[in-house]
Image (cartoon, rainbow, N blue to C red):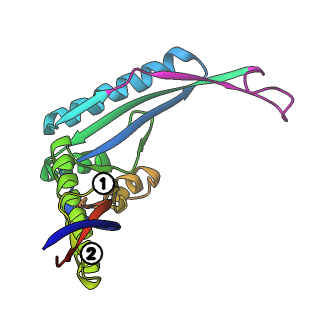
Amino acid sequence: MENLLEHRIVTAGRGMVRVTADEATVTIQLISQEKRREPAVRAVSDGAARLKSELDAIGYRRLTTSGASVEVQRDRGSGQYAWNEGPIIGYQAQQVLTLTEGDFDRLEKLLGALAAWEPPAGVDLQVSPAQWGLTFDAERDASAEAGARAYADAKQRADAIARTAGFGLSGLPSFIRHGGQLSSRGDEFMAPVIMAHNNRAVPAPPPVTLSAREFQITAEITVGWEIEKARAL
């Protein structure tokens, strides 16, 4: 029998891997508005130092602190002034802390401390919804597994098509194109921290509990397969 290369078929495959997040990042902003620049900057700087001391006592994987940024507040009247014009009426200073933690038991303690912490007078605390994340190694390994599943899916489809038509795959694919995405669910677990600071009437911060967080990594692949048909001599 002689194998003659005749045609090529193209199939698409999809692979999905679910993996639990192994770290979370929380962004914390301290904001102060004053008539003069120096008191506003001093208020957020002192507040950030106090908050950092509270978090230091618990421990964390990483905490980065930005320098204080200052925005001029102007009275623009009824729109007669441009955005950078008008009499100066005050200054708004802001300092940002970015907290990253991979131990979720400790993360619960950190979030509880944030919920209970009372900012200094004249300072507003804003805690953004946390972002669940994967370390580089975890994301790389999960992406590789999703890619392998997508390739297997594409090959299974190609085998089925080829067998139905009386062909076989010739061996290595002629081309491969791939893509994919990483997605996760929302950030509901930060709600207790946000509520504790947006509603001062709450007598005590609600308990902070974390649910299992899951990422879905999807790989999509398109493969061209050379096919061959057996023919008797």
* Residue that mark 2 sits on: 157
Tag 1: residue type?
A: Ile
Q: Amino acid at mark 2?
A: Arg
| Residue at image coords 22%, 48% | 134
Residue range of the region highlighted in magenta in the rendering: 65-87
- Residue 90: image x %, image y %? 63, 23
Q: Main secondary structure of the magenta part?
A: loop
Give the residue at mark 1: 176
Give the farthest residue toward the top: 38
Whether residue 127 is in magenta: the answer is no
Quadrant in which the N terminus is drawn:
bottom left
Taking depth in this image into account, of 129 and 6 the one nearest to the observer is: 6
Which of the two residues, 59 or 54, is positioned nearer the viewer here? 59
Q: Residues within 10 Å of mark 1 (few under 14, many from 20)?
A: some
Q: Compare marks 2 and 1 and give the one earlier in the sequence.
A: 2
- Compared across the picture, whether 72 is left or right of 160 comes to right
Would residue 118 be seen by someone viewing this image from the given angle? Answer: no
* Vertical relation: 64 (above or below) 21: above
Residue 78 position (above or below residue 144): above
**For residue 164, what is the image quadrant?**
bottom left
